[in-house]
Amino acid sequence: MKPERYDSWYERIRKGYSLKEEWKLYFLPGKEPRLWRDGKFNNPSQPVVGVSWFEAGAYCKWLTLRFQSGEITPPEWWNSKSEVSLPTEAQWEFAARGGEGRFYPWGNKPPTDDHANYNQDIGATSPVGAFPVGDSPNELGDMAGNVWEWCRDVWDPKAYQNRKSGASDPETIEGDGNLRAVRGGSWNNPPLNLAAPVRFGGRAWVRDADLGFRCCVAVPPSH
């Protein structure tokens, strides 16, 4: 999205799209995400950073409605019940680890400079997909390093201890909604933070240089 279009995007978000009333406080005309015009972080090939959990969720809702209206041509597998959202922690972790339960997306060995952008080696985010050696079993890039990624879940440090064994795609929805889960590690983190099981919580309104998001699409049966 071009900077000059940002105000109109914000205004459209605030006027509708079924946002919760308290969320609208975070959408003010002219209030761009942090680093939106910073040349170190705003190249179109880089992941967006400096966006809050509220902004990330609103973008997913906006994109869903654009696909539904046909304003943006959706993927061919899209159907009327599809929805773009942030991934739950469970969805994110499965995408990163695969059915094998890998410690890192590429396997169980620690990262090297070929696997990911981490440890401040580059000093900023890198272009999306720049480290294919580090792809997950599901062929997803940058699941480790580059940017932390917002998840849909409310942050609960004991969530995985409290979940019932065998629960299908559990999601934490109770608790302080201003705290949300983040996954994946980033360009300025040490190797261990890149491990797929590592999880942290962040304040939902922060806009950090190492924090972005990944969209997830649920494609339920069309009938």
Image (cartoon, rainbow, N blue to C red):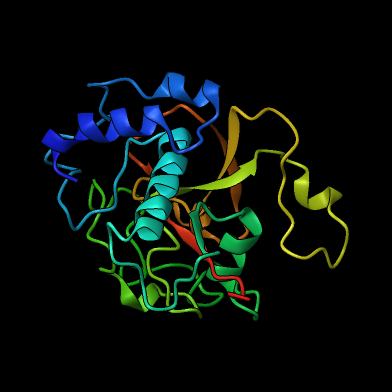
Residue closest to the eye, 75 or 154? 75
Residue closest to the eye, 219 or 207? 219
42 lies above or below 81: above
| Residue 62 pos. (x, y %) | 38, 46
| Residue 136 pos. (x, y %) | 47, 75
Q: Going by the image, does 223 lie left or right of 1? A: right
Residue closest to the eye, 103 or 29? 29
Q: Residue at x 43, y 67 (%)?
A: 111
Q: Quadrant of residue 89?
A: bottom right
Q: Residue at x 34, y 53 (%)?
A: 66
Tell me if I can see residue 133 in this picture.
yes
Q: Quadrant of the C terminus?
A: bottom right
53 lies above or below 128: above
| Residue 56 pos. (x, y %) | 42, 42
Q: Going by the image, does 63 lie left or right of 73? A: right
Tell me if I can see residue 207 in this picture.
no
Q: Going by the image, does 158 lie left or right of 47? A: right
Q: Residue at x 46, y 49 (%)?
A: 149
| Residue 120 pos. (x, y %) | 30, 48
Q: Tell me how many marks there are.
A: 0
208 lies above or below 182: above
Q: Going by the image, does 67 lie left or right of 82? A: left
Q: Residue at x 58, y 71 (%)?
A: 97
46 lies above or below 138: above
